[in-house]
Amino acid sequence: MEEIKTIGIIGAGLSGLVTAKTCLEYGYEIKVFEKDSELGGVWASSRRYPGVTTQNTKDTYYFSDFPMPRHFPVWPSGKQVQSYLSSYAEKFNVLPNIKFSHEVVHIEFENNKWKISGNNRSRPFTEQVDFLIVCNGTFSDAYIPEIPGMGNFVDAGGDILHSSEFQSTRACAGKRLVVVGFSKSASDIVTRAEETARKTYIVFREPKWKIPRYIKGINMKYLILNRLGEALVKPDKHNRMERFVHRLGLPRRMLAFLEKYTSKKQWLDELGLRPSSGLKDQAFGEINLDTPEFFEKIRSGQIVTKQGEITAFEGKEIVLTNGERIECDMVVFATGFRQSIPFLPDGLKSKLTDGNGNYILYRHILPAGIPSFAFVGYNTSIQCTISSEFAALWVCEYLQGRIDRPDEEKIITAGKEFIRWRSQFRQQGAASGLSTMPGTIHHVDELLRDMNASLPFFSLIPDWLMTIKPGRYKKVRNKIIRRNQEKGD
């Protein structure tokens, strides 16, 4: 590999910021390209909807060497998360290296360098770097399905928005609102919007499990956000402890208990909202955190549920699969995102994915056939602060020559093996093969092994019985960085 001095980083969201900070620690010059005028990615003010919070508790959602402020609530708001990320970027000198309002339009590898072209508020720019890391995230392009009659609905005075465009409940004041989807963003938006809307509906293909924030008075993090929570589903490579847990039948009993408790607490059978698949099938890929008052408002009739899909817009009405019509003034699609790398040449795009659009990456980081190029943040998970932080560290160790690049065949084989295992769980298609759930901690363990490092044994006990706290990874991270500094002296 040619000597690497300058690294380009595309995206200043969570993964881009931790990648930039890590590269600086390794002594690289960095250039961070962010198309928005602010940092934060999905947490930026231009993309967050009213009432959005983390699904993690604040003590499980931070970088290992930078805890969330103590005064933040248990589940921080989107505004607070962006504030946290801004403080992180400022403290670790990342902020001066971010080129805001720089949208990358095209990249090209020539003469062993990446040429990056784009627009800065309509003014063209061109930069060159030795190595390129894409951190544009797995929530890059808002997805709204194409449905006949949408244009006519808008012409008739209706509004069609994606959840990331829904900025204020004032927008739906006095209107008949339909929210499409059953994700956390869907339930968050419809619950808040009900306060101002004239009539509120939620339309969904099928209901999904929503984990209560507290289960018999115990914060859900003690049951889900730990190694035991991951062990509820057999990982692709299980260890002795996980095999022992499954032999005891503990996962089966825990899942049965969670389903029964959740169904009763949220009146799922009474409301006709019990999912057709079990918690194990959804495997924490489609499962999301309960929205306070969501089920209460459905039960009281304040929110009207309609199971089905919108087949057409006719005037100011939507038509559902069962033929039912609903008059409405605004439709908000909480239908997620589609992964996209629009600046990548077609010749390179074909090297990244299989025939089904799944990304084939080694460790969710390295693609086959593309030199001096890596991803960070393409290992999306509920533990994304840890997974992104150690993916960034892995890339820097790779650049230092302490991790060998696998041959192209091994990269492809490893990527396809993961896709094969992950395909048994739901949400695989939407995640484009990039979700590490329900094996995120396994994934981080694997990254650590590649770096000849591991967590101390005593930290594994609370990881199993309490919660996965990023702070427990601080020592092993610092040890890896010190090792690099010592070898550089």
Image (cartoon, helix red, strand yellow):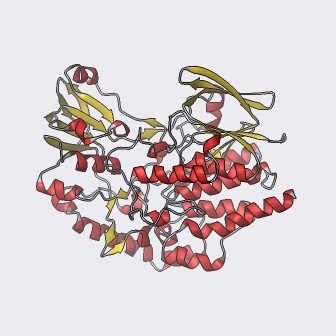
Q: Using the image as rendered, state which of residue 24 and residue 313 is in the foreground.
A: 24
Give residue 396's position: percent from left, percent from top: 73, 51
Q: Using the image as rendered, state which of residue 96 and residue 281 is in the foreground.
A: 96
Give residue 299's position: percent from left, percent from top: 14, 57
* For residue 25, side relative to residue 289 (left or right): right
Outermost residue, right side = 489
Give residue 33's position: percent from left, percent from top: 61, 35
Question: Number of callouts in the render?
Answer: 0
Which residue corresponds to the image point at 34% horizontal and 40% vertical from the top-left?
Answer: 163
Q: Quadrant of the N terminus?
A: top right
User: Can residue 297 be seen in this snapshot?
Assistant: yes
Q: Is residue 392 above or below residue 175?
A: below
Q: Quadrant of the C terminus?
A: bottom right
Q: Using the image as rendered, state which of residue 248 and residue 54 is in the foreground.
A: 54
Which residue corresponds to the image point at 40% horizontal and 42% vertical from the top-left?
Answer: 336
Q: Is residue 67 above or below residue 177?
A: below
Which residue corresponds to the image point at 57% horizontal and 40% vertical from the top-left?
Answer: 11
Q: Quadrant of residue 108 in the image?
A: top right
Q: Is residue 210 above or below residue 306?
A: below
User: Can residue 233 be seen in this snapshot?
Assistant: no
* For residue 176, side relative to residue 347 (left or right): left
Which residue corresponds to the image point at 77% horizontal and 49% vertical from the top-left?
Answer: 27
Q: Quadrant of residue 221 in the image?
A: bottom left
Give residue 180's position: percent from left, percent from top: 28, 41
